[in-house]
Image (spheres, rainbow, N blue to C red):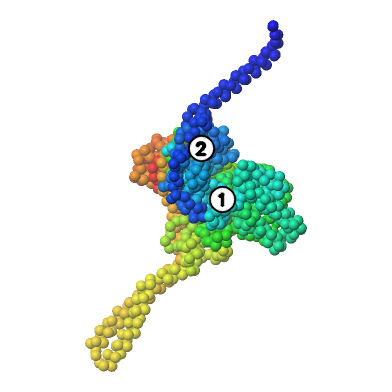
Amino acid sequence: MIIMINTTTFKRITGAVCIMLLTVVQVETALANPTHGTTNVWISEEQLDNTPPADYKINEATQGYAKDQVYNEYFLNEDLQEVRISIDENNLNYLLQNAKEAPYVMADSVAIGDTTIQYPGLKTKGDYTLLYSYDHNAGSDRFSFTVNFGKYIKKADYGAKQNFYGCEKISFNNLYFDNSMLKEYISYKLFDEMGLPVPQYGLAKLYINDKYYGVYFMVEALEETIMEQHFGEKDVDGLLGKPRDTTLSYEELKKNPALICGNDPEELKDYEAMIPTMLEWSRKITNLSNGKDFDGNAIDVNSEKYLELLEQVMDIDSNVRYFATHSWLCQNDSMFAWYRNYGLYISEDGVSTIIPWDYDISFGTYGGITSYETANYDLDRMYSDNFSAAALSSLEATYKRFPLFNVIYQNEQLMSKYYQYMSDCSNIAALGGYATANDKTYEPAYFSKCIDGLNDALFAAAGENLAGNVFYMNGARQPAFFKDAIPNLKNIIAMRAIGVKHQLDNSDYKVTTQGCDLSTIGNGLAGKTATGGNLTIIDENTGIYVSANYSDDGVAPYLDVMTPENPDALCTYRLESNKAATGKYQINIPATKEMTAAKSLVFYYKTGENIEKLEMTQNGNIYTCTVDSLGVLGIYDEADKLRAINPAMLIISILSGVLEISLILCLCRLIIKKKTKVAAIVIACMVIATISLVLSVLNINKGNASNKNIGSDLNVLVENAKETEILQGKGWWGIYENSESYVLTGDGTYTYNITVSEENPADTGFCVEIYDELGNYFTTTSDGNFWYAGTNGTSNKTTETTNIKPGDKVKVVVKRVNNTYTFEYINAQTNKLMQKIVATENGNFAKVLKIRFMAQVGTFYVNGE
């Protein structure tokens, strides 16, 4: 039989066959070449070894209860923990090849610090980040992981469920959206300081089969152990869920109770006995949110009866603290956006407590908001319209859908407490002072100092060579990205602190965020900031902030505070800005611990040739004054100055006076008795005592005179206020240290005085860079190389290259005139020009520039002027 096929049909058939063949080839290729793992061969489930030895004995020394808090010591606050996982290669590759499905496999052991647990379970973890880690990072196995200590060592087989001093699971997050490596750490720290039931947390260097997988955020998994610590109980029998896809309204949970456990029916089975209690809790809290009592009758939401009923279903104070802290952190990927990312505990008595969870995209790095919007974000707003499935026409309408927060939002007394806790967050994080949440007093820039304390260890750990199957995901190039992120993280913390304070004070000032680029810390936006009007600028390292009115000329003001050493003062600050205000400046100084301990504070201020004593007002721990221009501020303890008036001389003067009186009385007796020789000796002693008395009095007067001249030391500080930075570079590309950036507005000149350490290697070098917020930059190196980016440009080197050597003293002068940039390298010992590069910009740089010194190889002592 002959079948006739026309040309069109033939083409369709052959096309379909080709597609089928291509699909087969693609499947075979995919099967032959897994995108993850340390082998090109797919590992099957049959090849796994997930059975511990039958005679395995649990180490009783590492068993425990969470309430005893022993495992807390393994989550380090000031360093990185070392964690080593040993695992069969087949088990590891099966896990990595199938990471998206997050299967459990057995590891041989996990060592956390000096303690080892055998045969734990190991799985990948995550939601959105796990999918992206797998699908968009082929060749890197740096997934997030969870270690389950009792997954394979259960009570039925081994007499007890294995744990780690009471801890059941620990997760290791891969920092996918966090170039700073500290966003989530700082977020948990704030919740911790605010007294919330927080999982234990820290940072870790993770090794798998002795291969380095990099820096991870180490956090206790969302388990009942958190509440056991919080309540100090051996066991808790309530329901701990991770709600998802629900507002927690009674109507939703009644239809699908599994939503309380992440919409996982299998997990809900563990809490089957708690389902009636959970649903009754939801009914009651939904009633209160709707302005009704438990019987459905209308109730005044600002009445004492309302609070009494609310207390029966909620740990009120803990929940208010949670929402205040959550709002302060600007984490918009939450219950109000996509109905997720928090833990909820409901006790057997039907009382709920929220547990903070998943804060890797805090500080405005989710929802498309800039640093300016983050710093000034509405106190009551906890979602972004662009990224919220729940956003309605108003906050009231939106929050009405979320009973867990609405029961707080609609009550004036609770919202007053909410605002007080937001103020506490600002004080804890950056401004210093008293926090009602924990009855503690904080130093200014507390979080900035915490970050500085971890900086060196993190930089070193991020720069170590990774395993061959691992790289930092999401395009992160570490430690260079970390180095760029840290100043911006410190900035946004300080800026958010003052932005919240201004709103609480009903101030019309906005925080300008010049120099703060959220894209550097991961998943954020660069964006623009306000350039004119009533603006506040803040220094992240001191908490000092300045408010003033600025002209709207397209240039945003920026505050630079230096702290030159001054042994005569408690604190000395030099305040500078790239832009002058249209009127006076309001300077606000948070009190340091030295200032708080002082008996009688005095403030002296130096501008130009004038030194004046400032009249300060005090509000809490903030000292405020108004000045005409920025200058040098010295803060002194006047009482200490008075007490410091040579106490030895004071004692001598008193003794001399007593001796003088005694000698006079003795002389009178001798004269009466006519003992002239002895009288002459007494007269000589009187002369000595008189001289001693006069000298000691003069010394006291001299001390009083110096006390009257407090602040005169500021004259010297004005001449030499910039501190010498010690910068060390460890590699030509990416592993260098940057100086503080100097801000240049328009045309101008800046000079670096550099001493090259004599201990440097022969191959030593640095570069100087001028750049703007648009991504344009010109950079020149000490060996004469030059490059530019972000704009078309040309350069001309007019002298021969002269390499620097250990021990050299070099002056680098950077000039900008119109669109021309000049870099001059001068031998400071001979004043000879070593090299000169002139670069001409063909594009458009921003008017505001920054200049920085970059140590590449070696140690350099740098002083800018």
- The image quadrant where one finds the N terminus is top right
Q: Position of residue 681 (x, y in %)?
A: 25, 84
Name which residue type carries label 1.
Answer: Glu
Under circle 2, the secondary element is strand
Q: Position of residue 655 (x, y in %)?
A: 34, 79
Indicate whether 611 appears above or below 450.
below
Left or right side of 355 for 838 = left
**Badge 2 is on which residue?**
105
**In the foreground, 685 or 628:** 685
Identity of the residue drawn at 48% across and 48% down: 164
Mark 1 touches mark 2? (CB < 8 Å): no
**In the foreground, 364 or 254:** 254
Q: Position of residue 563 (x, y in %)?
A: 47, 56
**In the foreground, 136 or 448:** 136
Residue 847, quarter of the rendered image: top right
Indicate whether 92 appears above or below 308.
above
Mark 1–mark 2 distance (CA, rounded to whole Å)? 23 Å
Q: Residue furthest left?
A: 677
Identity of the residue drawn at 28% across and 81% down: 685
Name which residue type carries label 2.
Answer: Val
**Badge 1 is on which residue?**
224
Q: Specify which label sits upstream in the sequence, 1 or 2.
A: 2
Indicate whether 528 appears above or below 10.
below
Q: Position of residue 672 (x, y in %)?
A: 28, 93
| Number of residue marks | 2
Left or right side of 159 for 370 = right
Identity of the residue drawn at 51% across and 46% down: 155
**In the foreground, 520 or 384:** 384
Q: Specify whether residue 484 is in view.
A: no
Q: Which mark is residue 34?
A: none
Residue 846, quarter of the rendered image: top right
